[in-house]
Amino acid sequence: MQAAAPILLHTLTLTPTSVTGSQPASGGQVSGTYTVTAGGGASGWEVVTSSRPNWITVSPTNASGTSVTPITLTLDPNEGVARTGTITFTTRGNGAPQTSSYTLMQVAAPIMLHTLTLAPVSVTGSQPASGGEVSGTYTVTAGGDASGWELDSKSNWITVSPASATNTSSTPITLRLNPNRGRARTGTITFKTTGMGTPETASYTLMQAASPAHTLTLDPVSITGSQPASGGELSGTYTVTAGGAASGWELVTSSKPDWITVSPTSATGTSVTPITLRLDPNEGEAPRTGRITFRTNGVGVSQGTSYTVMQASVSSMVLFVPGAHLNEEVIVVNPATQGRLRIHHVEQGTTLTLRDLTSREVATYKELPEGDHTLPLGRVSPGIYLLMIETATGKRLTKRLMIK
């Protein structure tokens, strides 16, 4: 038979056995000498951390061996009602652990009275839409048991400087408003005291007038009809006029197609400004539409207005003359380059006439023999042209030709 394991008896001694009296609300180290001693079969001791309130600190929190260990007890400041907390110690090692506790009481926070004064007590009248610093002298003063003041909240279009103070003297502040580009608005700035005790708050309410109105006039109000594929300056007189509180106007360049040119692109003041509109040639197969937008600038709500420009394509200008038409077997190498026009599958006796987009004849090649041909273009300028093909038998077709 084997004997049972010896029973290891632990002992745990706190000296003194209790913490007497209530500790001050200001917190700090508990006065006096406190020790923890493990004995018997214990190998040491430790604080049961799960039982310790977070406003009590014990140092050290454990020890090995059975010697007397001094400890310090420290309390956080109490900013509320009176409170009581318990810290429990337990032995470590083989055997049945022993526990012992200290109970600490801390008095309630003293009643700290704060005061907060704004001078003047309000901001009178409505501030201008242009913004800027609010006229007048404004001060914030914390008093009583407060240690200072700070900005608690504000509308994002209001700036306050300084935003805090760490004293109870009268502090001058400046109030600045952003320009208002919309409707009339109202904002609030709130201050509060800092330090132990119940904070006091005080507020200013500011009103800012609506942004002045802008006007923008285009004359004429629209561009009628479709512009020719050949491009160039639009006929007629076009003007842009900014008015009201606008300081001028400008072209919204991000909205303008690159095939439309506007000159000038901006103007300062509210006088009538003539503009010219110029289009690049439309070398595409389809008509195109573009929008040019103008807007006012300056303090206030910007106004915008637009012209819509339509431009025909070259293909939409090609008119087939009456009579039997050629089929698509005739091949024109397009574009024509290096001063030469190349054409294939020409019938015997075919005549070619090259015209610009105003129908002006610029070159003629008469009664060509059957086959493929490379024809000199001479001094024909680069651009878009119409090549009119007519055979000896009266078949006719007009093709678009680009010359580079």
Image: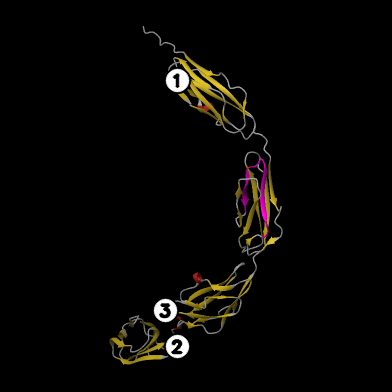
Q: Tell me the quadrant of the picture where the C terminus can be found.
A: bottom left
Residue 139 inside the magenta-drawn segment: yes
Residue located 50% across and 74% down the image: 290
What is the magenta range? 135-154
Disc 1 packing (10 Å; few <14; some 14–19; many ≥20)? many
Q: Residues within 10 Å of mark 3 (few under 14, many from 20)?
A: some
Tell which circle, 2 or 1, labels the residue nearer the N-terminal end. Answer: 1
Residue 203, above or below 281: above
Q: Residues within 10 Å of mark 2 (few under 14, many from 20)?
A: few
Amino acid bearing label 2: Thr
Dots 2 and 1: beta carbons under 8 Å? no
Residue 375 position in % (x across, y down): 30, 88
Label 3: which residue? 283
Q: Residue at x 32, y 93 (%)?
A: 367
- Nearer to us of marks 2 and 1 is 1
Determine which residue is flagged by label 1.
44
Observer-nearest residue: 261 or 95? 95
Determine whether 21 is above or below 275 in the image. Answer: above
Residue 106: percent from left, percent from top: 62, 28
288 left or right of 76 in image: left
The single residue placed furthest to the top in the displayed view is: 1
x, y percent for residue 351? 34, 91
Residue pictured at 38% horizontal, 90% vertical = 362
- Inspect the image, locate mark 1, and give the three-letter code of the amino acid beneath it: Gly
Label 2 element class = loop
